[in-house]
Image (spheres, helix red, strand yellow):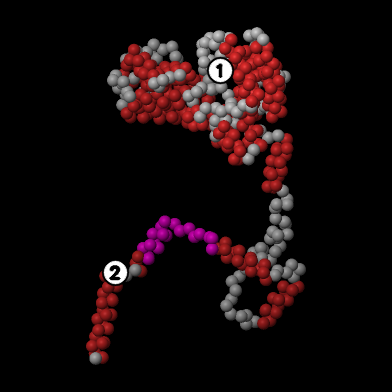
Amino acid sequence: MRHLILPPSIEAFLDSYKDFIQGSKPKVKQMENAISKASRVRSFLYLSVGKSGLADWLFLYNLAGIKAYSEQLQKEGKEITTVSFYLRNILHFLQFLIDTPPPSCRIRRSQFKEITRMVQSNLKELGRSLVLHQLKVKAAKMAHIVSPESLKSCQDQARQVIPELLTRMEEGSTDLRDDLYGYLSAFICSIYGHRPGIDNHKTNRDFGGAQIFLTLEEFSWLERWLRVRMNLGPKNNLVFITKGEGPVKNMFRYLQMAWGQMGLPGRPNFTDIRTAVSAHAKNLHTRGTRNRLASFMCHNTETADRFYALVLDRKQGSDMRRDFEKITSASSLPSSSSLPSSSHPLTRRSSHPLTRRSSRPSSCPQATAGRYRRDASSSEPSVSSQEVEEEVMTRSLVQRKLRVTISPLQMSKLKNLKTKRKPPKRKRLCVYVNILFLYYIVLYIVK
């Protein structure tokens, strides 16, 4: 898809899009990102295959081809997250095309809306599969979580090995630079959870640059390394140098090499160690302390809760199980004696329904006495007056909460009946005037 032959006008527009992404002062990483995004857009322009007159951009108005674009990416073996990233990149390019269309573009606004809507529909269809993929990734993170014991062992061993490496390098050994980089990066990352990055990033804008506090002994390691670095003839002003002029790009390999030399389990990368530091901080510290640690790690707690796995040890898992069992434990449920029984005289409506009390006393004393005798001879348990009052109050509250549903036809009839009963305002006014007139006549006659 990326090796398409496009007209010079489209190639020039793609170059302008790439320059727009790079910005005015692009860094190396930004230039690489711009090239990648332009390459993804080029893969989307496969819709031009088999068509002529491509300069007018009308080949993009192919809804069936756009719908099959995400399926084609998945057939090529790309992960669902990569496909989602492609579609978001395409939406960004379409917005750039809508805002600054080239002079030869003949796509109407309505057609642009249909194209954008189809890409958004493809992106929406990936939602469920994307969530399942993220859950699998989090489960994989759980399997690669670094324990606190491994992090502590890494720090202890690095404190012993780093001074020895510096001593040997000061004596003339020049092949230990990669080992020093690995032990230093493992030591710092196991404490703060920092990882290599670029100097112009969203975390830099939100939190500033990554900060590291070193003790006097740890800072002396860097001072000794800078003296050794001067003897190696550096070609740049970076702390960690290479034989060339560029920065170190193999810190991940140096980290895993040092981790293996320490004899620690697994082969974690910087992200795994960062995840472990964040998860253990969440389990150990309070919310305020955790927020401060997250800010120092250059990310907020919402990001940690969303993308980093929560790891519970055996004791925490047991406490969590106990909390869940409290929900359904027998001690928290009401006892059977406090629940109304089916044999209770107040709950058996068929045998002893509650009837409305009469406002007048009974005129038949014999019937009343017989009723009292029947109640006394009954084998059912007696009910106190307080229980009867509580039952009556409960039923009255239930009856108050009932809502009467009226059909629209009945509602209209009620409205008509209500309006018919109301006399017109003019007739009311006439009645009031007549009554006032009669009042004055009576006063005149009396005088």
* Residue type (three-letter) at the residue carrying disc 2: Lys
* Residue type (three-letter) at the residue carrying disc 1: Val
Residue 58, x across and y down, in percent: 33, 21
Residue 296, x across and y down, in percent: 57, 32
Task: Report the Cα–Cα distance between label 2 and label 1.
Answer: 94 Å
Quarter of the figure with the C terminus: bottom left
Q: Residue at x 53, y 16 (%)?
A: 238
Question: Is 311 on the left-hand or right-hand side of 104?
Answer: right
The mark found on residue 319 in the picture is none
| Residue 40: quarter of image | top left
**Disc 1, SS:** loop
Q: Nearer the viewer, residue 308 or 383?
A: 308
Q: Nearer the viewer, residue 406 or 38?
A: 38
Question: Is 133 on the left-hand or right-hand side of 312?
Answer: left
Quarter of the figure with the N terminus: top left
Question: Which residue is labeled 2 in the image?
Answer: 425
Region rendered in magenta: 400-418
